[in-house]
Image (cartoon, helix red, strand yellow):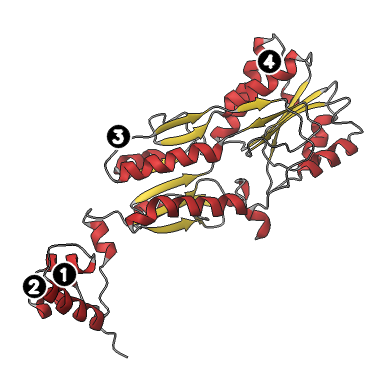
Amino acid sequence: MSVKRRSTIYDIAQKAGVSAKTVSKVFNHKAGVSPETRRRVQTIIDETGYYPHYGARTLRGQYRNCVGVTVAPPLEMVPLSEDFLLWLFAKLSEVFSSRGAYLAFDMAPREGDAGISDYARGVWERLYDVCLIVGPLPLDDTVLPRIHATGIPYLSIGRLDGFPEASMACVDFQDGTYKSTRFLLERGHRRIALLSAFEGYQAGLDRVRGYKQALQAFDVPVDEQLIAYFNPSKQRLAEVLATLLTQHGVTALVESSVSEDSDAMHQAAAQANRSLKEDVECVVWTYMKDAAVLPEAVAHLWAPVRESAIEGIERLARWTDGHTPAPIQITYKTVLTDAEHLFAVEKPKRIFDLL
């Protein structure tokens, strides 16, 4: 069976006896074309089913057509929830839809059994004209500088020590663990356990840095046995927490994994024969403002990831239009509160859990 050749803008122009520029004006509903010519060109467009070749436009650098979203770490390591993913899609649609852009989500940029990551494959293959990178960045990441070097408008929802000039919108997680640990130190605790996440990633390193910074400010020695990382693809949260709570002399806990799972925390306390209110005071992190994962915690810390992303995405659109300088540099501070909360937030449904 023969394949019908796709009509080009030049085919339409030749049939209508006009220039390709005139065809473009008609297709994009722009002024400068007489009613008679517009009707004639539009009839030919309708008959041929013509649509512009957006890929060719992109290669010529004349049109920003596709906003790509990619995930730096393996999907199972990223606390992406249904709610966040839908919100991200809605926000990108709101900001870029008026520009006629497509949205492309690359949720699993892995190759082979080793899971080798090149999360910018949509950039190298020229699918993306704008790139949004979600999730923490590996400490040894080499992809981000390569994206930067292309000149493509991009935004990383996360920072990287090795490439501070990157375009980014992030939360200061070091600030978060510093505030959390200091709060507990000021309440008299000296054996404070830390549950982190993202071992081998910048966001995990920043958490441990802030924790150690606070301990050093109070001349409290760092005990590496009191630091644990949670990997949701390999571990159960309750078991990791129970191991921390059974460490000698632990009287306080900073739960900075943002797993937002109060049931697992209660299970861990039961396994360790501890009370999360009476003999272990907790500071628990959440991505939701004015919310608590664990109502009996002595304090709650809000990491405004979504809020920093909103500002970043809006500025990314202005960069795409040439209305704002690049790179984008946004860092939000965390907010700690000891306000009382009567109810725990519902555990988010993570994307990996649904697969």
Q: Which of the marked residues, 2 or 4, is nearer the chain's N terminus? A: 2
| Res. 143 visible in picture | no
Labels 2 & 1 near each other (Cβ < 8 A): yes
Measure how far apart labels 3 and 2 are at the Cα level.
Answer: 39 Å
Measure how far apart labels 2 and 1 are at the Cα level.
Answer: 7 Å
Secondary structure under tag 3 reads: loop
Q: Which mark is residue 163?
A: none
Q: Residue at x 51, y 50 (%)?
A: 88
Secondary structure under tag 4 reads: helix
Q: Residue furthest left?
A: 17
The mark lying in front, picked from 3 and 1, is 1
- 224 shown above or below 10: above
Q: Which mark is residue 325?
A: 3
Q: Where's the C terminus, which quadrant?
A: bottom right
Labels 4 & 1 near each other (Cβ < 8 A): no
Q: Which of the marked residues, 4 or 1, is nearer the chain's N terminus? A: 1
Measure how far apart labels 2 and 4 are at the Cα level.
Answer: 75 Å
Q: Is residue 295 left or right of residue 78?
A: right
Measure how far apart labels 3 and 4 are at the Cα level.
Answer: 39 Å
Q: Which residue is mark 2?
A: 18
Q: Which residue is mark 1?
A: 23
Q: Which of the marked residues, 3 or 4, is nearer the chain's N terminus? A: 4
Labels 2 & 4 near each other (Cβ < 8 A): no
Q: Which residue is mark 4?
A: 215
Q: Position of residue 284 (x, y in %)?
A: 72, 32
| Res. 81 visible in picture | yes
- 52 shown above or below 279: below
**Amino acid type assigned to the residue bearing label 2 in the image:** Val
Secondary structure under tag 2 reads: loop
Secondary structure under tag 1 reads: helix
**Amino acid type assigned to the residue bearing label 3 in the image:** Pro
